[in-house]
């Protein structure tokens, strides 16, 4: 939540900062601003709303200067407005901040008693006041920032500049992410790598409590007390074009279409069909460690939580290990039953979701071994894990997660096979069959994407609906949950995902001609339709008997489901545990086309942000 970018170097930086903010807009988009320090002093330009509003304002008055900070906001304290937009300026100091300062009211009162006047409703503005006061007492900028940090309680990624210390940025991190970018004659800071990728691929991820002074000559890293620190420089292999739309109308559309490539990258070098085993780079799990574990406990939020529900089925089926899946926001505060015999798996695209990170730490503090399934390399959750399974999906910019979900499922499948092999519950020939199916997936994904025109037609037909129900059984139940989440977050249509068997326990009361029902009804194997398929045929009949309209996702070659449905999308069939990777795609495309048809902001839906770094 909230995106920060900063630059010190030899170039005029206002435009460069805005270019960086564009790559971070997914983090928050209710206002944006830049502060630039040049010969005429410190200039701040801010605008409520999307970045385009700021750009328009900058077109009228581009501030000049070669040191600057920028921010794109997701409001926590104070409504979206010009005044509450960052940077906040006071006494020659400008600050941008991501996080929440818990004691800001108390500090504000003390400062107000000393004569300070506040221009915004934000918690962030107190930083500018505190730092300006510290500077006035004769401290250097780094010491003034340290002094201010000693007074605040809360979370922050903070970037500060001051008229009294030109050509310098001071940054600090506590719980919210920050990365430094290293250039030849310039240096950067940002909330996330895409903001600076056009300029450098050499980065340092800051750790909790890190403090850095950035000049064009270099970066000095210390802890808050001023003790020198050494942090590894990492080379990022994402290219700047990976974060572009490449001719697609929206990032979400591009990312849906990238799933075959993304899955190939998740699987590459890890699945050996010949040996019937899996090699997980970054995971040190061996037979001895696994023998010491008695359960898996997964923590995640949103789409990652849905992927985890399917992951549970995969691990329980293939490795015969009990798996619990928790919403990270519920796990933390309920005295979870986790100990040194637990493998805690944190699943997160961004690797920085506050609730997931907090739960992961909680589980680890109780002795659990921590394994992260993450997309963003070097992210906070990945850094705190003993074992990391990167999904390698590439940057996901659309707020609605798509390729993150399918690659998380592939990662879970790899983990399940590995655990099964290590525990002896899966023999090599069976593992081989599973891995063959996994290897075929990218091709099946491509085949599914070819149905886009039909799915688009169905989407247009139902795009005026007020509500929509998604039903699934077994491995398709999490897909129903995910389908409903996707539709509501981007189209604002109310949608619910339900286990089809639960329908008769309540939701069936909702069924009538105004409540379309999307039913996930693929067959479970080539040879046998499977029990979930047979049962869901019954559920479709129940819906129809009550006048409900059915949109069905069924297997190619199936004739029973299409006979019952108003619209049927036929998809390729695969192994039942992997089928969700295929059947989720029509739900993604359906939601996308409904939203696009309704004219909503698909990539940046209202009230949301891509990375939720506050609790
Ligand atoms: O980065 P994470 O996977 O930890 O994010 C978790 C959720 O915030 C995320 O999946 C969210 O639900 C998406 N907007 C869903 O499309």
Image (spheres, rainbow, N blue to C red):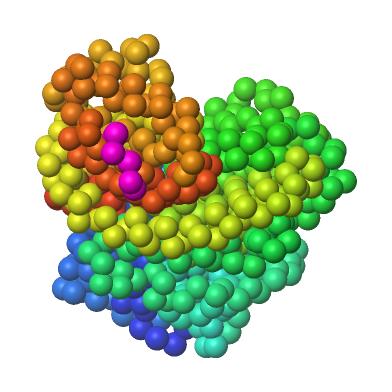
Taking the spot 20% from the left edge, 56% from the top edge, the residue there is 453
Taking the spot 27% from the left edge, 21% from the top edge, the residue there is 541
Q: Is residue 595 left or right of residue 481?
A: left
Seen in the picture, residue 314 relative to 581 is either above or below; the reply is above
Q: Does residue 320 show up magenta in the picture? A: no
Seen in the picture, residue 559 relative to 473 is either above or below; the reply is below
User: Where residue 87 appears, x then y in whole percent?
Assistant: 37, 59
Magenta segment, prevailing SS (helix, strand or loop):
loop
Q: Nearer the viewer, residue 336 or 172?
A: 336
Q: Is residue 7 left or right of residue 308?
A: left
Q: Nearer the viewer, residue 481 or 79?
A: 481
Taking the spot 18% from the left edge, 45% from the top edge, the residue there is 459
Seen in the picture, residue 87 relative to 560 is either above or below; the reply is below
User: Where residue 217 appears, x then y in whole percent?
Assistant: 58, 84
The answer to whether residue 320 is visible is: yes
Q: Nearer the viewer, residue 468 or 11?
A: 468
Outermost residue, front side: 527
User: Where residue 561 appears, x then y in whole percent?
Assistant: 29, 34
The answer to whether residue 2 is visible is: no
Taking the spot 17% from the left edge, 35% from the top edge, the residue there is 566
Q: How many marks?
A: 0
Q: Quadrant of residue 134?
A: bottom right
Seen in the picture, residue 229 relative to 391 is either above or below; the reply is below
In the rendered structure, which segment of residues is drawn in magenta?
Answer: 556-561
User: Where residue 507 appears, x then y in whole percent?
Assistant: 31, 17
Q: Quadrant of residue 379?
A: bottom right
Outermost residue, right side: 288
């Amino acid at each position: 939540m909230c995106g920060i970018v900063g630059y010190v170097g030899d170039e005029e930086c206002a435009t460069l900062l805005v270019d960086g903010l564009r790559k971070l807009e997914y983090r928050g988009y209710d206002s944006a601003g830049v502060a630039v320090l040049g010969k005429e002093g410190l200039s701040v330009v801010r605008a409520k709303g999307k970045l385009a509003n700021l750009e328009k304002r900058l077109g009228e008055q581009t501030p000049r200067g070669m040191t600057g900070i920028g921010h794109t906001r997701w409001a926590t304290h104070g409504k979206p407005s010009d005044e509450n937009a960052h940077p906040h300026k006071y006494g020659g100091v400008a600050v941008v901040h991501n996080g929440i300062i818990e004691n800001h009211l108390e500090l504000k009162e003390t400062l107000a008693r000393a004569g300070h006047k506040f221009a915004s409703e934000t918690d962030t503005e107190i930083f500018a006041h505190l730092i300006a006061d510290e500077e006035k007492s004769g401290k250097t900028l780094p010491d003034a920032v340290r002094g201010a940090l000693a007074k605040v309680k809360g979370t922050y990624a903070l970037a500060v500049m001051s008229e009294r210390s030109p050509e310098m940025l001071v940054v600090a991190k506590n719980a919210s992410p920050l990365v430094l970018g290293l250039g030849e004659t310039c240096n950067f800071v940002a909330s996330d790598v895409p903001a600076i990728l056009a300029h450098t691929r050499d980065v340092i991820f800051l750790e909790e409590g890190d403090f850095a002074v950035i000049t064009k000559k270099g970066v000095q890293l210390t802890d808050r007390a001023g003790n020198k620190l050494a942090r590894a420089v990492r080379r990022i292999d994402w290219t700047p074009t990976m974060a572009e739309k490449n001719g697609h109308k929206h990032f979400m559309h591009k990312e849906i279409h990238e799933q075959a490539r993304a899955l190939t990258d998740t699987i590459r070098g890890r699945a050996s069909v010949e040996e019937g085993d899996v090699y997980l780079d970054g995971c040190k799990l061996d037979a001895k460690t696994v023998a010491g574990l008695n359960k898996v406990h997964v923590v995640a939020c949103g789409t990652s939580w849905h992927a985890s529900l399917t992951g549970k089925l995969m691990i329980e089926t293939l490795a015969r290990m009990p798996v619990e899946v928790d919403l990270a926001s519920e796990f933390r505060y309920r005295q979870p039953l986790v100990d040194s015999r637990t493998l805690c798996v944190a699943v997160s695209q961004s690797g920085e979701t506050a609730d997931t990170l907090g739960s992961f730490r909680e589980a680890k503090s109780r002795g659990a071994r921590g394994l992260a399934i993450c997309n963003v390399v070097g992210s906070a959750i990945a850094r705190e894990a003993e074992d990391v399974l990167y999904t390698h999906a590439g940057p996901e910019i659309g707020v609605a997660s798509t390729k993150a979900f399918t690659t998380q499922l592939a990662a879970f499948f790899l983990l399940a096979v590995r655990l099964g092999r290590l525990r002896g519950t899966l023999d090599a020939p069976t593992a081989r069959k599973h891995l063959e199916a996994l290897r075929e997936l990218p091709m099946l994904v491509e085949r599914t994407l070819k149905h886009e025109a039909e799915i688009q037609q169905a989407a247009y037909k139902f795009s005026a609906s007020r509500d929509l129900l998604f039903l699934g059984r077994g491995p398709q139940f999490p897909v129903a949950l995910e389908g409903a989440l996707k539709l509501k977050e981007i189209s604002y249509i109310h949608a619910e995902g339900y286990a089809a068997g639960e329908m008769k326990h309540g939701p069936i009361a909702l069924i009538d001609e105004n409540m379309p029902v999307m039913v996930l009804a693929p067959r479970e194997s080539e040879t046998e339709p499977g029990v979930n398929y047979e049962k869901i045929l019954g559920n479709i009949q129940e819906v129809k008997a009550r006048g409900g309209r059915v949109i069905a996702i069924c297997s190619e070659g199936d004739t029973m489901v299409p006979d019952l449905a108003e619209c049927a999308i036929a998809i390729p069939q695969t192994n039942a545990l992997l089928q969700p990777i295929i059947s989720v795609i029509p739900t993604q495309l359906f939601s996308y086309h409904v939203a696009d048809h309704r004219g909503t902001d698909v990539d940046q839906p209202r009230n949301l942000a891509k990375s939720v770094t506050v609790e």
